[in-house]
Image: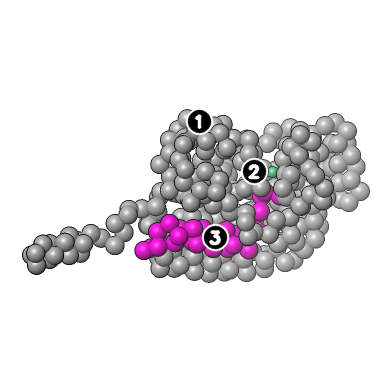
Amino acid sequence: MKRAAWLVLAILWSVPAGAQGKLNVVTTTEDLASVAREVGGDRITVEAIAKGYQDPHFVEAKPSFILKLQKADVLIVVGRELEIGWLPRLIEQSRNAKVQPGGEGYLDASLHATILEMPAGQVTRAMGDLHPQGNPHYWLDPENGKTIAKDIAAKFSERRPNDRASFDKGLADFTAKVDAGEKRWLAEMAPYKGIKVVTYHRSFPNFAARFGLDIVGYVEPKPGIPPSPQHTLDLIGEMKRQNVRLVLMEPYFDSKTPNAIGRATGAEVIVLPPSVGGVKETTDYIALFDYDIKALVDAIKRTGAK
Ligand SMILES: [Zn+2]
């Protein structure tokens, strides 16, 4: 009996601390994967479904995504209906109870983030607006990045209590990195407060609010509605009136209309990735802001934009 007890203890001791193995995390976007990686470190594996150079509203639902979701312990989504056009069917087909909305492994990263452009009345996608629950591109404010990381750390610790200390350290390190970065980015943008820009899609309101951009108009009449001739004419008129020198375009849109607007107004069109993986330099969440702020400041200097 005594010998058997020792045997049990010996077996228990021989099992490493992380006996449950790594937490298998799937995120909808590369931005969330980057934050999850910072928090989770070597205690997780993480894979994003959408690539950063794709429009996150419109992702082709491949069967391989269902396989990823079948094996996931945690699914992190942007929420605010960003993924509503392609994710619900994938989740359903995965038949993985953990990652269904409300399941133990499901995390909506928008829950505690600052969400802008909340609609006043009832707005539905039937009206053609892709942002019926407020603006879903909220990760483009580093303050929201920290909030997202906090929620991710809490979810990871809930699923793997033994690794809580590791997740807490990942969160603290990431938060410090974002704080240092934000100080740098704010200083670089400080001379250009109130700079007037036009953007293609409403991807940048959180970014603009944090870094002092004044968004005068959008190439799209409404989020998800392609540019119309009348809207483009009105926008050109407004840009001339306000002397707007910059049009910011996400990498996944057709540059035809922005270029025409550029020719008509003398404004420069620059591609500004809203996501990690949007261009090859934006390798993680911090690098995304480093790249976008530099691209913006360079363009402001080049064009003399005000
Ligand atoms: Zn959008």
Eyeballing the image, is 246 above or below 14?
above
- In the image, ligand 1 is in what quadrant? top right
Amino acid type assigned to the residue bearing label 1 in the image: Lys
Nearest the viewer among 235 and 129 is 129
Asked whether mark 2 and ligand 1 are closer than 8 Å, the reply comes as yes
Residue 15 figure quarter: bottom left
Provide the major secondary structure of the magenta segment.
Answer: helix
Rendered-image quadrant of the C terminus: bottom right
Residue bearing mark 3? 151
Instruction: Please report contact status of discs 1 and 2: CB closer than 8 Å, yes or no.
Output: no
Please provide percent x and percent y for residue 262. Answer: 79, 40
Tell me the crowding category of disc 2: few under 14, some 14 to 19, or many 20 or more residues within 10 angstroms, Cα based. many
- Residues rendered magenta in the picture: 135-163
Q: What whole-number distance in Å separates the C-alpha atoms at marks 3 and 1?
A: 28 Å
Amino acid type assigned to the residue bearing label 3 in the image: Asp
Eyeballing the image, is 168 above or below 45?
below
Please provide percent x and percent y for residue 226. Answer: 76, 33
Residue bearing mark 1? 62
Q: What whole-number distance in Å separates the C-alpha atoms at marks 3 and 2?
A: 18 Å
Of tags 3 and 1, which is closer to the observer? 3
Residue 58 figure quarter: top right
SS for callout 2: loop
Q: Residue at x 89, y 45 (%)?
A: 238
Residue 187 figure quarter: bottom right
Eyeballing the image, is 175 above or below 255?
below
**Mark closer to the chain start, 3 or 1:** 1
